[in-house]
Amino acid sequence: MRPLLRLLNSHVIYLIEPPGPRTTAALHLMSLSTTPGMPIGPRSRRRLLLFLALVALVLYFFRGGDSIDDAVPVVPPPERASTSLPGVIPSSDPSQSDPQVANPSIPNPIDTANTAIASPAAATPLTETTTSGEADATSNLSSADVVSYLGSALPKSLTGRPLSRVYELAEKAHLADLAARQAYDDAIDSKALLFISAATSQKDLIQRYWQTHKLHYNASVQHAAAERLREFITYPNVALNSESSSLLLPRKTPLCLISTYQGNNDAFPQYATVLADNIVNNAPYADLHVFIHNVTADSFPSGAQRDNVKFISLDHIDESYRYRGFPGFATDKLCKLFGRGTPRDKAYGWEGQDEVCASLETAMGQFERSNGDLMEELKGQWGNIFSDWISSDRCESWAWVDPGVAVGNLSRWMDNDLVRQSDILTAHEGDRWRLYLRNTFTVHNYRRNADAVNSLWKRCDTLASLENLLKAFRNPSNFLGLTEGCYSKGALTAPGIQTMLAPWQMPAWGEKAFVLLHEGRANYCLGEANAELCRGWVRGYMEERELAAANAKPGITHTASEVLSAPPQGQERTPLLETHCADWIPAEYNLCIPQLDRTADWRTSIYVQLVRTDPTTNVTEAVMQEYETPADGVGADGVGDRGVGEALIVKYLGWASKTLSKGEKVPPKLEKTYWYSAEKGSVQITQGKILLHNIRGWW
């Protein structure tokens, strides 16, 4: 033992400071006798064994002690990958080159965003699968999800409550990350809107718009820029000097119209030109967005785009909607509304991510393929589905409208106190005993209580949850009656909501019909087949109304705006009846009143109905109000079976389409004269034909 200790001591000293010339201790230790043919002696063998022992000892210390399979490697927490903002090359400071173009006191959102905290990266979606033995029964996450989110492995020995705690914290971190991303996006939107609203000229506005567009595109930014540009062009004094308007709040459009068209890989119908031209003449009171899917590319109405009329193909919103269509678009919006988030990859939809959303999109697609009108059934949810275009931030009210209709002068009929003080307006054809919201044209007014109006869909059980929607669309029927039934009754009976029902739609009955839209007025003729004779009737009617309005005595109300802003001449409460007055609507959703005959009084009075539910008693009542007939012709109930009238809404496709021998209906053919223009032309609709012409060439 002593020789071994002496050997160790001597070689430890060698390792510290070897004798002789400066060499490494290891080389000195390895200086063994290697003479050929001579065996290694005992001393050399001891040196070799000692060297191997020292190597093992060094390796042991370098590995950090005994190896434990269950130990977690010490790794730093994963760093958040910052989402860099899209690269923008800001133009030179406008305030340096043109002091009257920019307001230097307003910060540029690009500079602000570049110095802000980086946006959190998108969190890895957490699936709803659970691996046996990896988490308790209450967890909706798998260990693979947590490992992916944390960026490190979980120890095998971590079980029970500690493991559950890991899952709870991972879920909390995931939700907080999503909230942070949303807050960051909202902040960028607000900065962009501020930047847009502070423009001091058209040139400055255009420059600011493109800068914010590159920074963070959002429909609200586009709308704000369009509103601001309209102010510069139409209201230059309001744009900069008005004390009543804020630069941060763009002027809202009084009425935003939404329409949809589902094609069958065929041409977009030419008759929709009528609605587009009508809305062009209603600027700046109204604008229109028409959402289109599955029409041929060459028929898409790109040339019909106007400042206040936009045709939008679904695949322009997202490429996946080219094949997912309205079922995919609606499902994405509804699932987001109900807290299911958005698809990880819209190209694949909801498959493998959310079973309910995936099944709903499939069921909606099958309903559509069975000739069901999907978007018509979902009109009660349009306020959410199309919120980017019709929100209360940019519209005073919004309405759904059928693409196969013509509209008159909207402001003449609707810019009055009676309409503004009602939460909902729907136009009917004179069947006032049926209380329901018409699919053709219904307005939702944000002016009184936007939150209440936006929440009316919750009163329809079918629309109130994804599960109920899925159950409804799995029904083999191709008609559900959700809009005119379930949603309609829920809205009409909502406490505190006032609904106005007015006979402002042209009656569909009558032997023949003729419509002439000129200077924003929709006049119609019933009971006469000869178009030339009807044109003369309509001309005489228009001249009569113009003369009556011109000869009205000063101080006497005569226009619709004045008449419907004054107190009614009389009113009559009508009881609600438990009858089935609308047989196409499920019986449980019917609301009816007695049929009151007022045809003898239509030339001297107009009638509208107001339906209200008392918030205290929860009792719904219908009140018929009487007003004098305006001298400008607005609001007259009808013309009976023969005569001339004026309407706000004309649903013409039913009587104007031709019926072929096999029973197939063909839409009216569109013809346009050389001199026609949307701004100054006239639209004439007869059976089988829509003629766009200049009225001077025909009268």
Image (cartoon, grey):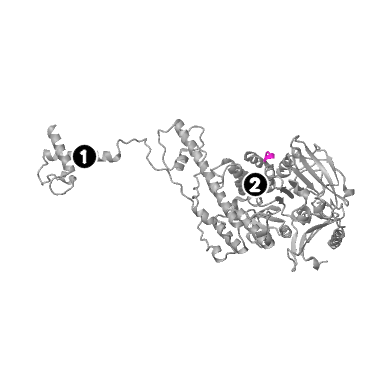
Mark 2 and mark 1 in contact (Cβ < 8 Å)? no
Residue 416: image location, x then y, percent? 78, 51
- Magenta segment main secondary structure: loop
Does the magenta run of residues contain 628? Answer: no
Can residue 652 be seen at all in this image of the molecule?
no
The alpha-carbon separation of the residues under discs 1 and 2 comes to 75 Å
Which residue corresponds to mark 2? 384
Instruction: Estimate how packed mark 2 is, as few (under 14), some (14 to 19) or many (20 or more) residues with alpha carbons within 10 Å.
Output: many
* Residue at image location 57% in from the left, 66% down from the top: 98
Q: Badge 1: how crowded within 10 Å, few (<14), some, or many (20+)?
A: few
**Residue 460 lies in the magenta-colored region:** yes
Q: Give x and y (percent) for residue 500.
A: 77, 46
Q: Give the amino acid at mark 2.
A: Asn
Which comes sooner in the sequence, label 1 or label 2?
1
Q: Is residue 678 above or below residue 506?
A: below
- Read off the residue under disc 1: 54
Per the rendered image, the range of residues in magenta is 458-462
- Label 2 residue SS: helix
As drawn, the residue found furthest toward the left would be 38
Q: Which mark is residue 40?
A: none
- Percent across and percent down for residue 283 are 72, 59
Taking the spot 24% from the left edge, 40% from the top edge, the residue there is 58
The answer to whether residue 285 is visible is yes
In the displayed structure image, the side of residue 648 where residue 112 appears, left or right: left
The image quarter containing residue 513 is bottom right
Task: Decide which of 296, 420 is in the foreground and name it.
Answer: 420
* Element at label 1: helix
Q: Quadrant location of the N terminus?
A: top left
Q: How many marks?
A: 2
Residue 534: where, in percent of width, then height? 85, 60
